[in-house]
Image: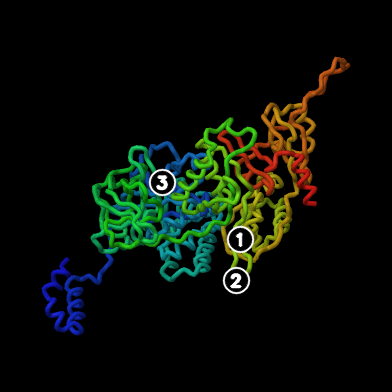
Amino acid sequence: EKMSLWLGRTSSTLRRHPRFFFPSLLQNYFRRNNTTAQYTTNPNLRNVAIIAHVDHGKTTLVDCLLKQAGAIKHDHDQDRVMDSNKLEQERGITILSKVTSLEWGGTHVNIVDTPGHGDFGGEVERVMNMVDGVLLLVDATEGPMPQTKYVLSKALQTKLRPVVVINKMDRPSSRPDEVETEVFDLFSSLEATDEQLSYPTVYASAREGWAKIGSAKSTDMAPLLQTIISYVPPPRVRVSPNFTMLVTSLETEPFIGRILTGRIHSGSVKPGTKVYALDSTGQIIEEGFVSKVLSRIGLTRHVLEEGHAGDLVSIAGLTKATVTSTITSSTEEKAIPSPAIDPPVMSMTIGVNDSPLAGKEGTNLNPAAIKERLFKEMTTNVSLVVSQSTEDKALEVKGRGELHLGILIENLRREGFELSISQPRIIFKEENGEKLEPQEDLLIDAEDEFVGVVMERMISRKAQLIEQRPYGGKTRLRFYCVSRALLGLKSILDNETRGSTQIHHTFHSYVPYQGKLAANLKGSLISIATGRSTGYALDSIQTRGSLFIGPNVPVYEGMIIGENAKAGDMDVNACKEKALTNVRAAGKDEAIKLATPRIISLEEAICRIQEDELIEITPKSIRLRKKILSSRVRHTQRKKGE
């Protein structure tokens, strides 16, 4: 406004000497008003994310920091308080990125807790532009793992300042000196800048509640908090009266409505501020008024009078804005670029359940409702892609891996949906006419006696051995293998190594198509009758393989009731009853002894099914079935194929 008034007063002069006078006027104006300084910082604010491989102690560390800073009470009974999602609590993993904060020494520290599993890497990628530094947690025994490399590469690409925390120092098997060397080598391999290579190293035990620098003794987390404040830079924000914020997460509360969380890039926001929601192209998708400005301290949401530039806040009042939307108080502002998300690597087809048992356990079998729910999920789950499938009334869902898609399906079944799920398929791509497929960096920790078994399995799946070394009484094997080779691998190795192997993997690169891999050596036991299973029938069937069901369970023709011990499928009658007779036997009938049925988990079912099979998902059951239920039709088609 000052510039417009000033130019108006000098308009006659400008008309007389436009070429020579106008540049000097602008130069004097900007020098006088200091508008060349377009950015500033808030010295009393820090934004930091905690990144690590799964089970390296991120959430436990956040708990400890919040307690010692007074953000939550010390007598709080629950562990991993940031894992508020029910599935997170059941599985002991972090699925969603969450924002909290604490006060320390007059500085407000915003902390973003991120997932550690590779399938939820999109949650890490979308929060990188919210923070100015990261705490890289590394297990003092395990050292850098595949996901450590992945999340660190994303942080370095975003030019964030890292602080290395070597956690679990209380373990007798800790080897901090070796791990510190491995971490530095990892930084070097990822081409970190000189500034990023000068990271501080903090040794900690989140479980015992202490952190230290060097050999100095400590009984609390003060050294770590002080390192964050002194090393992580304050947020750099654009000087502008206009409020702008990029939405990075979305949630809904019954009495508040849609809550949008993000980092304020410029300006400030108060309740009652008129705002506009822009999509990625800058088009206005919604306008409205901010009803509340919220911030989370510890576990509690607090209502703010005003949110300032650089802070991580949540706003309510809009109904259409979603993740990656830009919220601004001026229509002249451009959309803030959202961080690039790595593409999905796996897809599957999801449709309504159409088995003979459909509708008996669930409440929602409407294809339109399933479609609406999946597209709604895509607005918050940034790694998910949903599109219409070529199959009738089915949708193609693309994700980052088996666990990523498995969590989605588990949420749907708990909401009352009945679904049919196809075999997962790896997503290929073409470059210069060449077919490419994703390759994984795979780490397997195996007992010495099972190394040969693991090697045999991986060689049959065309894996390339990169490294083999002893590790904590086990042998650590590192492979490069295509993503297709991981389908069903965990369940196979668990069976052959008595569950003693640990598998970790993350996306590495795209490689030329590797051709066909070794097929599943075992087939299925398929019911040819409809009714209820009997102990008499199962007693003879269990000699053919392992059973998935027990007696008196509803079955139907085409349902898979077990795994064949040999290659190929076998039709069986699980409903057969013992024929009655009036001839008395001299001795008693033999007692039936059935083995405990093998309960198939959702992730195992996703890995096990073949191309001609489906998973039947209901709120109470997980069943396997053939796409074509009739055994006669299946046999006819098989003969035609031959």
| Residue 432 tag number | 2
Q: Residue at x 40, y 63 (%)?
A: 161
The picture places residue 633, in percent across and down from the top left corner, at 75, 42
- Which SS class for mark 1? loop
The picture places residue 541, in percent across and down from the top left corner, at 78, 34
Q: Which of marks 3 and 1 precedes in the sequence?
A: 3
The span from disc 2 to disc 1 (Cα, nearest Å) is 13 Å
Residue 219 can be seen, yes or no:
no
Vertical placement of residue 273 versus 515, above or below? above
Badge 3 amino acid: Cys
The span from disc 1 to disc 3 (Cα, nearest Å) is 43 Å
The picture places residue 270, in percent across and down from the top left corner, at 24, 50
Q: Is residue 456 left or right of residue 399?
A: right
The span from disc 3 to disc 2 (Cα, nearest Å) is 52 Å
| Residue 416 tag number | none
Q: Which residue is mark 1?
A: 428
Q: Which residue is mark 3?
A: 64
The picture places residue 301, in percent across and down from the top left corner, at 33, 43
Q: Residue at x 73, y 55 (%)?
A: 518
Badge 1 amino acid: Phe
Q: Nearer the viewer, mark 3 or mark 2?
A: 2
